[in-house]
């Protein structure tokens, strides 16, 4: 006989949408209580920062970072500066005081939420979905929800994103066919039930401020128990996108992967990556998603010519910026001159992964992997 099941039930009996357990609900209540009790204070601290970052209610580029990921944050800043892209509209939500110093040193506006972020881990996640990874997801929800609720469009991105061109240009273009969408997401590449139907990647997306997006983000905040149970806010977000598109008319767009590529393309689309590596195709951004851990992210970025952070950068040593220093008192130009390369710092690591130069003398990362540049793509 037919049996009623949820849409996450697979043919092998697995369930992608098992409901959160009581431990997840109670843990989320604790975090949500902290958020609600301190909302007015945090909002009051954010408003003057947002007035500096976006004085005319302009869009805000929001990033969340802890100490363990801070070199990726610094690389993003250095890469943007190498292309002459201003970072005046970037706001970094630091998960710890060390990251706050690093962001200040690179000339970015930064906010450390001592109420909601005080117990977040400083180290990077060892792998996707581990305890460190999951604990950072609430911070990624809070920062976007707060800035959006305070009246701004938001471009949220993970720190493992590098810009080829300033993506705000296309999102702010009133004549673009993308202009009438409420939320626009990078295509994750995965086609599983977890992310259907939009397959939205939560590591790069644009949110326009309106009633529909405001309620979607508030709803995601309330669904934090799902984030704990699923060990990912991307799955919880995709489920809500479907519901809100149906109930409230939320207009959701999945962006063209050739304009906004990520790890799916890096690992699965070698012909496309050859065009990017050779410069015959220039996307807006690149997101090093679909990668097991930070160590590999760094190596892949370096051989793709997307690494601009000098190894001798003093921000990561005893020359760190005074945490009490005002942003306008820091010699940002001196820090940038020491930390940021004008051209990419290219090095080879794996011959079977995309690279701007042939890495035939390097080992493969995958068993039996052949050279990226000598494989004939069908």
Image (cartoon, rainbow, N blue to C red):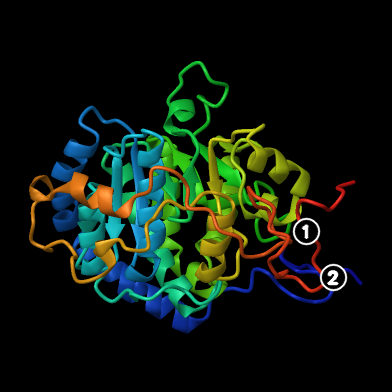
Q: Position of residue 215 (x, y in %)?
A: 41, 46
Q: Which residue is mark 1?
A: 371
The residue sitting at the front extreme is 361
Which is more toward the observer, 2 or 334? 334
Q: Position of residue 138 (x, y in %)?
A: 39, 65
Q: Is residue 247 visible?
A: no
> In the picture provided, is 34 more to the left or to the right than 217?
left
Residue name at image x 24 percent, y 73 percent: 118
Q: Secondary structure at mark 1?
A: loop
Q: Quadrant of the rendered structure where residue 139 is? A: bottom left
Q: Position of residue 91 (x, y in %)?
A: 28, 47
Q: Is residue 177 above or below residue 377?
A: above
The tally of labels here is 2
Locate the N terminus and report the quarter of the image it occupies. Answer: bottom right
Residue name at image x 48 percent, y 82 percent: 22
Q: Is residue 108 visible?
A: yes
Residue name at image x 22 percent, y 52 percent: 335
> In the picture provided, is 45 more to the left or to the right than 201?
left
The residue sitting at the bottom extreme is 23
Q: Which residue is mark 2?
A: 11
What's the CA distance linking mark 1 and mark 2? 37 Å
* Neighbourhood count class around disc 1 (C-alpha, 10 Å): few under 14, some 14–19, many 20 upward: many
């Amino acid at each position: 006989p037919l049996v009623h099941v949820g849409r996450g039930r697979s043919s092998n009996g697995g369930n992608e949408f098992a409901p959160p357990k009581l431990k997840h609900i109670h843990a989320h209540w604790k975090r949500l209580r902290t958020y609600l009790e301190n909302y007015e204070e945090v909002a009051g601290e954010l408003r003057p920062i947002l007035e500096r970052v976006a004085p005319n209610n302009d869009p805000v580029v929001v990033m969340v970072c802890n100490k363990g990921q801070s070199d990726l944050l610094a690389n993003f800043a250095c890469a943007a500066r190498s292309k002459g892209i201003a970072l005046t509209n970037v706001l970094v939500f630091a998960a710890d005081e060390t990251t706050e110093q690093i962001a200040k040193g690179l000339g970015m506006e930064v906010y450390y939420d001592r109420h909601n972020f005080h117990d977040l881990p400083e180290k990077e996640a060892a792998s996707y979905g581990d305890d460190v990874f999951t604990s950072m997801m609430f911070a990624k929800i809070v920062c976007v929800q707060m800035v959006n609720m305070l009246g701004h469009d938001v471009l949220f991105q993970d720190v493992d994103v590098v810009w080829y061109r300033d993506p705000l240009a296309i999102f702010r273009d009133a004549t673009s066919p993308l202009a009438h969408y409420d939320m626009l997401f990078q295509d994750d590449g995965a086609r599983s039930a977890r992310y259907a139907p939009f397959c939205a990647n939560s590591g790069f997306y644009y949110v326009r401020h309106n009633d529909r997006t405001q309620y979607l983000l508030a709803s995601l905040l309330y669904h934090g128990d799902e984030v704990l149970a699923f060990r990912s806010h991307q799955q919880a977000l995709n489920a809500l996108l479907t519901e809100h598109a149906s109930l409230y008319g939320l207009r959701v767009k999945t962006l063209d992967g050739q304009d906004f590529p990520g790890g799916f393309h890096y690992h699965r689309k070698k012909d496309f990556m050859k065009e990017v590596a050779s410069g015959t195709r220039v996307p807006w951004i690149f997101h090093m998603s679909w990668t097991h851990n930070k160590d590999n992210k760094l190596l892949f970025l370096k051989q793709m010519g997307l690494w601009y952070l000098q190894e001798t950068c003093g921000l990561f040593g005893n020359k760190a910026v005074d945490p009490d220093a005002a942003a306008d008192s820091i010699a940002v130009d001196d820090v940038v001159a020491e930390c940021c390369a004008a051209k990419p710092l290219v090095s080879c690591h794996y011959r079977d992964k995309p690279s701007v130069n042939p890495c035939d003398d390097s080992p493969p990362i995958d068993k039996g992997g052949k050279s990226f540049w000598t494989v004939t793509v069908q």
